[in-house]
Image (cartoon, helix red, strand yellow):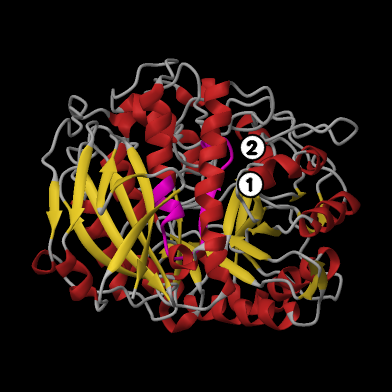
Amino acid sequence: MRYSMISIAVALAMVSGCASTGGSKPASIAAWQKPDEPTTCVRTVSGKDVVLTGDSISLQKNDRGCFGSDSSMCDIRMYQIMTESFRHGSGGASGPLKSWGPSSHTGNLRGVIDSLDYIKSTGANAIWLTPIFTTLPVAGQDWTYDKLDGTGYYTSDYFSIDPKFGTKEELISLVNKAHAKGMYVFLDGVFGHAKANVAVKSPKGNELKLSIRCLDLFGNVDKMSLKQARCFETEPSMPFLKEVASYWIKEAKIDGWRLDQAYQLKNEFWKELSDEVAKTSKTVTYKMNGKKVHPLGYMVGEIWSEQPKDIERTAFKNNALISAFNFPLRAELVKVLASRENIFDRSACGQPATELQAGYRKMQGYTEGSMPNMFLSNHDLVRFGDLLQRARYEKEGVHGSSYYDAHRAALSFLAAYSGPITVYYGDETGDETMNFAMQPENCGKTDRCDDHVSRTDGHVDRLTADEEKLKNDVAAMLKLRDSHKALSHGVRTHLFSDHGLFIDFKSYGKDRIIYALNAGTSERKVRFEDSVWSKLGYGSCTIRSLNGSRLQGNELVLPGLSGSFYEAQCR
């Protein structure tokens, strides 16, 4: 969760980083402040065909995280679900009924169970559920806290499932059924803050030590006072937090945790929790794909910053966390294909595809072995479809071919990424929030603020033909990662980029893949001279189309707004 800016009253009620919908303040000016006119967004319309030669490419490779790693965590394709808004399953709990965002707020665990086949069909192999632990009102709290309780991000009891979402038995059933279908399950661990009425004694007698002070992104003590929430004195609370983290691995056999506002714990404490999760996971087994396995033990932190140094310091330093969400590279992706949330930032949109290579280069400063998790949208961001409209590339409510093509292109970038990835529910079908392109005045009263507007009702049935095609195309791209490990594990050599094109060569063992993104609107052709293969260390290579990508001999034919995959068969 991120810091909400819906009202001065709510901001003052919570600590910085613990506001009405949670998380950290973005560094840039928010769109609703409107200091200037919106940025004029212009896509590349045309471009010359390209001839690649050995002299035109650099052999600089990535050497961090999953670029060449054998870790199974690199294969994670996580499907993020906002539990309170995703789906209501008949016969299950009511859902919270009140929360932030435009959904009906009737999501429950039964709805997720009923949707497992659909989730599997998207190409995902893992599920992340936003918090499902018990949250109870404090006497006299105002409507903002009533809605906040529905999100689950301010827990009252870490050891019980909120009856508004379902039961412990339903969670266990969900995890067992997901495992049987070959999917991992991760819960949302809010280990830095809780509701003021949180139960401070664990089943084993460990104690949570509460505090009215939180740590901010830079590790400083925030001096704002809390009202209906508390942070923790971390060191004395560690036995309690370790018990929470291991309890649900033992009880429900979950595969790890997504870590909310991870900067609220210092780096050394994440190391302790990560070690506890890894140790506990080795004591538990279940069957997946006919084999007895241990829970994965994956820990991914939310460090809401587009500065790699913040993510390195807070998450990756000393191998405290192995994974954190790749906010810096996500920012570059939406600037190239759509728009940033803040359209008043002059660099918000219309950026050249060369910025993607710049984003990759920023990862070189991370601790070796760290695995940034690449994503496009989440519950605190504006949906990609609405960002296309914010850039004025698309009109409100009009879903033509370019709308779906842009989604395919953006999600192809995730499919081609070495490391774990996350798809937010609905992005695979091109969901948007209707009648929302720009954040309105008084957005908190109408549930149309940037930081919660994407929490729409899940849309998994009665898909239109265009939605079904997009979902199937995305699934096919994601499943390429099973048969071509160069996508999820490969060492990356950047071949070319200009304003509209971005082309990588990826290798892992004998598997070699060319990935080409055309962010412009016109067809481009790319021809490979034999000297390219010599520069890459091969005698010769033959290019084979994957997944319907167009090819003429050794010349790639790249439609506008597309992501294309090719296999290079080399000797």
In the rendered structure, which amino acid carries the disc numbered 2?
Tyr
Taking the magenta stretch, the answer to whether it contains residue 425 is yes
Q: Which residue is mark 1?
A: 228
Q: Is residue 458 above or below residue 123?
A: above
- In the picture of the structure, the residue carrying the numbered disc 2 is 145
Task: Tell me the magenta residue range.
Answer: 412-428
**Residue reaching furthest to the front:** 553
Q: Mark 2 or mark 1: which is in front? A: 2
Image point (31%, 36%), residue name: 561
419 shown above or below 104:
below
Q: Nearer the viewer, residue 469 or 92?
A: 469
Q: Are marks 2 and 1 in contact (CB under 8 Å)?
A: yes
Where does the image place residue 32, in percent across and percent down from the top left? 33, 29
Percent position of residue 263, x then y:
47, 65
Classify 10 Å Cα crowding around label 2: few (below 14), some (14-19), many (20 and above). Answer: many
Closest to the observer: 103 or 286?
A: 286
Say what secondary structure mark 2 lies in.
helix
Of 9 and 279, the residue lying toward us: 279
Confirm whether the magenta stretch covers residue 221: no
Q: Residue at x 21, y 52 (%)?
A: 355
Would you place residue 534 above or below residue 142 in this image? below
Q: Amino acid at mark 1?
A: Gln
Does any portion of residue 439 appear in the rendered image?
Answer: no
Give the percent coordinates (x, y) of residue 321: 51, 74
Q: Quadrant of residue 438?
A: top left
